[in-house]
Image (cartoon, helix red, strand yellow):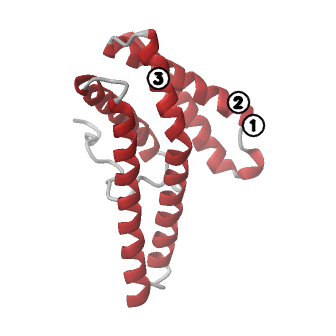
Amino acid sequence: MRRSVSILMALLVMGSAQDIVAQRRGPQQAPDEARRARMEQMIRSRFDAVVRQQLGLTDEQSERLQEVLDGFREQRREFVEEEQSTRRRLMRMGAEGELTEEHASEALEEMLRLREEEVRLFREEQEALVGVLSARQLLRFIVMREQLNQRIQSIRGGAGPGVVPPMGRRPNAGRRPPGD
């Protein structure tokens, strides 16, 4: 188990480090898409293997789980992109002093809309997963995925400018200060 998590973390760090370097270099020197896609697939495959082992999934359950997750993957990606774009826009507006009362109200409405969209997406995915996993397995899966997401965010949290944590989450939440 520890070895599986260590391998997964090494893959995540390598992929995140490449993303960080690419962001700092600029778009003209970004890593090629095929390499990034292979890295994402390796991480996804390793996570899938850990999930299968930890949850004790049968071949059929594993296949059905992947079908459900694949069905929601694009929606999740689009949501994350929209959320990050909105956050960057709001940060720019606030930093440039353009935040009028009207802009602030619109920003709050947009944040609320995004939260509602996130809840809708989570609910739909969980309803689909209930048909594949037991309640106990589903809860463990949610915890495993959240732990993975937190690790990714903690790696990206130290990435510097241009990397934006999800709204409502502090970039260094849960991290110990150096020297502790």
Distance between mark 2 and mark 3 Cα atoms: 27 Å
Closer to the observer: label 1 or label 3? 3
Q: Does the rendering let one see residue 100?
A: no
Judge from the rendering whether residue 11 lies leftward or rightward of residue 120; answer left or right: right
Cα–Cα span, label 1 and label 2? 6 Å
Mark sitting on residue 64: 3
| Residue at mark 2 | 35
**The disc label shown at residue 32, or none:** 1
In this rendering, does residue 16 appear at all? Answer: yes
Residue 107: image location, x then y, percent? 41, 76
Give the CA separation, mark 1 to mark 3: 31 Å
Q: Amino acid at mark 2?
A: Arg
Residue 87 placed where, x, y %?
Answer: 46, 64
Which residue does the image show at 34% across and 39% down from the upper left?
A: 127
Q: Residues within 10 Å of mark 2 (few under 14, many from 20)?
A: few
In this view, the mark in front (2 or 3): 3
Classify residue 84 as left or right of residue 127. right
Three-letter amino acid code at disc 3? Arg
**Closest to the observer: 118 or 147?**
118
> Which residue type does callout 1 highlight?
Asp
Asked if the residues shown at circle 2 and circle 3 are in contact, with their CB atoms under 8 angstroms apart, the answer is no
Residue at disc 2, secondary structure: helix
Q: Height in image: 47 above or below 160?
A: above
Q: Mark 1 near mark 2, Cβ–Cβ under 8 Å?
A: yes
Label 3 element class? helix
| Residue at 33% across, 14% down | 54
Asked if the residues shown at circle 1 and circle 3 are in contact, with their CB atoms under 8 angstroms apart, the answer is: no
